[in-house]
Amino acid sequence: MVLVYIIAAYLLGSIPVGLVLARLKGQDPRKVGSGNIGATNVMRAAGKTLGIITLLGDILKGLIPTGLAILYGLSPVFVVAIGLAAFLGHLFPVYLRFKGGKGVATALGVFLALKPVAIPILLVVFIAVLLAWRYVSLGSLVGTALMPVLLLLFRAPLEYVVGSLIVGVLIYWKHRENIRRIVSGTESRFSSQR
């Protein structure tokens, strides 16, 4: 049953929320801006409202399966496996030939299920970085790096910490082009995305 749950979490994570919503408006975020199917690029392609709905949908893809796994009392290792399956579904969706998004919102949903008390701190840090440098990607990367530390501080199971490190490595890998642009000063700033 756990294996079935993991597969179901992956298939849920694979649903390209942003692409589906943008297509309803006759747009394709893969042909705009960064070409990503996440909330920031959907906002560029199809407007703020659909961008926000995409953000919420991508968060729920991580929150629902991970939260249900915790609710059903599964062991931490299975909870993490299910959360990672949903996250990997977003990164490598079967419906889009394994070419998906960068995973920040879906990871946030997983983290929200694992340790809700850490999320307000992450959001404050994200907003602070965004206000200081106006890079959405930088705020996301700083928050991603902070999550394992917060899990340790809040005495989460070690499996959760390891899972957050795996998520972090994949998010940084998916953001490698953003990192290069931040270093070179060519990354798009938040003010130009509105």
Image (cartoon, rainbow, N blue to C red):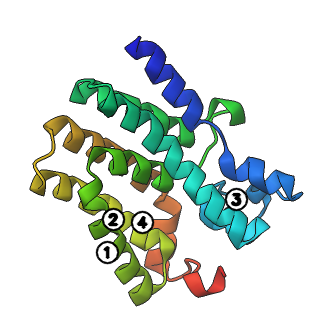
Residue underneath mark 4:
140
Residue contact between numbered discs 3 and 1, judged by CB atoms under 8 Å:
no
Residue underneath mark 1:
125
Residue 85 x %, y %: 45, 31
The amino acid beneath tag 2 is: Gly
Looking at the picture, tell me which residue is in the foreground, 188 or 73. Answer: 73
Q: Give the mark, 2 or 1, whose residue is nearer the N terminus.
A: 1
Residue name at image x 23 percent, y 24 percent: 75
The amino acid beneath tag 1 is: Val
Residue 133 x %, y %: 43, 86
Residue underneath mark 2:
143
Residue contact between numbered discs 2 and 4, judged by CB atoms under 8 Å:
yes
Residue contact between numbered discs 2 and 1, judged by CB atoms under 8 Å:
yes
Tell me the CA gap for discs 2 and 1.
7 Å
In this rendering, position of residue 49 left or right of residue 167: right
Local SS, label 3 = loop
